[in-house]
Image (tube, rainbow, N blue to C red):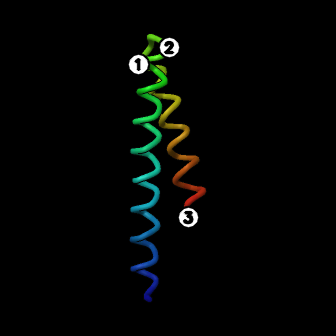
């Protein structure tokens, strides 16, 4: 597998992690009655998840 394919998969995993994190964060935001704060938490969570999946 070439390095370009590895890099592309890594970027997809990072994007997936961010998307999942934002979705979870929005759910947390609804529970806290503060959706923007939940999305911010989800973004941080998503970056962490995406980095861990690399």
Q: Classify residue 48 as left or right of residue 7.
A: right
Looking at the figure, which quarter contains the N terminus? bottom left
Q: Classify residue 47 as left or right of residue 8.
A: right
Residue 26's mark? none
Q: Classify residue 32 as left or right of residue 12.
A: right
Q: CA distance from mark 3 to mark 1?
A: 28 Å
Residue at the image point whose x is 42% and y is 36% from the top: 22
- Return the x and y of residue 33 as percentages of the image width and height: 44, 10
Q: CA distance from mark 2 to mark 3?
A: 30 Å
* Mark 2 or 1, closer to the camera: 2
- Return the x and y of residue 41 as percentages of the image width and height: 53, 29
**Sequence-wise first label, 2 or 3:** 2
Q: How many marks?
A: 3
Mark 2: few/some/many CA within 10 Å (<14, 14-19, 20+):
few
Looking at the figure, which quarter contains the C terminus? bottom right
Q: Is residue 3 above or below residue 46?
A: below
**Sequence-wise first label, 3 or 1:** 1
Label 1: element kind: helix
Closer to us: 34 or 27: 27
Label 3: element kind: loop
Residue at the image point whose x is 50% and y is 13% from the top: 32
Residue at far bottom of view: 1
Q: Mark 3 sits on what residue? A: 54
Q: Mark 1 sits on what residue? A: 35
- Return the x and y of residue 20 as percentages of the image width and height: 43, 44
Mark 1: few/some/many CA within 10 Å (<14, 14-19, 20+):
some
Mark 3: few/some/many CA within 10 Å (<14, 14-19, 20+):
some
Callout 2–callout 3 Cβ contact below 8 Å: no
Q: Mark 2 sits on what residue? A: 32
Residue at the image point whose x is 55% and y is 39% from the top: 45
* Mark 2 or 3, closer to the camera: 2
Label 2: element kind: helix
């Amino acid at each position: 597998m070439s390095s370009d394919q590895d890099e592309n998969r890594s970027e997809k995993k990072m994007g997936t992690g961010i998307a999942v994190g934002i979705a979870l964060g929005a759910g947390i935001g609804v529970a806290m009655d503060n959706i923007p704060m939940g999305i911010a938490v989800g973004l941080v969570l998503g970056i962490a998840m995406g980095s861990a999946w690399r």
